[in-house]
Image (cartoon, rainbow, N blue to C red):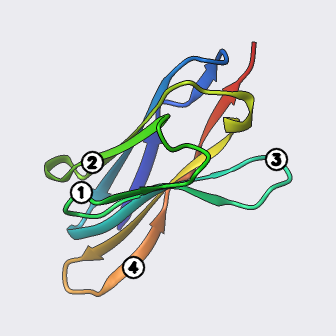
Amino acid sequence: QVQLVESGGGLVQPGGSLRLSCAASGSIFSINTMAWYRQAPGKQRELVAAITRIGSTNYADSVKARFTISRDNAKNTMYLQMDSLNAEDTAVYYCNAVIQRYGTSYRNYWGQGTQVTVSS
């Protein structure tokens, strides 16, 4: 079994910051790319940021220079530092990871999501 558990969401005022975490647990042999997605009400899920095992990153244009993705391979954990938040960032944020369990091939896993609400 593999689990991805997000934490760190909540309510924040415009201009504020939040830090999301995603911890992977279970019988994990290797984690490849990890990513954050988000889905706002009435919209499709979209990629926010992704990071490879060696630390290469890419970001959606809407969050560049405001969000920073990072990971700690020793802890199987990924982070998303979100600064200068605005109302358009309000969404459920999902953790995604490509994980290889012992004796199997890589598979795509999702977390349950954490709500981020930006409002005054």
Task: Identify residue for label 2.
Answer: 71
C-alpha separation, residue under disc 3 versus residue under disc 2:
28 Å
Numbered disc 2: secondary structure: strand
Tell me if label 2 and label 1 are in contact, CB under 8 Å: yes
Residue type, numbered disc 3? Pro
Residue type, numbered disc 2? Arg
Residue lying furthest left: 74
Residue type, numbered disc 4? Arg
Task: Identify residue for label 3.
Answer: 41
C-alpha separation, residue under disc 3 versus residue under disc 4:
27 Å
Closer to the N terminus: mark 1 or mark 4?
A: 1
Question: Marks 3 and 1: which is nearer the front?
Answer: 1
Look at 60% across and 25% down and name the residue there: 10
Residue type, numbered disc 1? Gly
Closer to the N terminus: mark 4 or mark 2?
A: 2
Numbered disc 4: secondary structure: strand
Crowdedness near tag 2: few (<14), some (14–19) or many (≥20) residues, C-alpha within 10 Å: many
The image position of residue 92, as x and y in percent, is: 65, 44
In-image side of 59 versus 105 (left or right): right
C-alpha separation, residue under disc 3 versus residue under disc 1:
31 Å
C-alpha separation, residue under disc 4 versus residue under disc 2:
19 Å
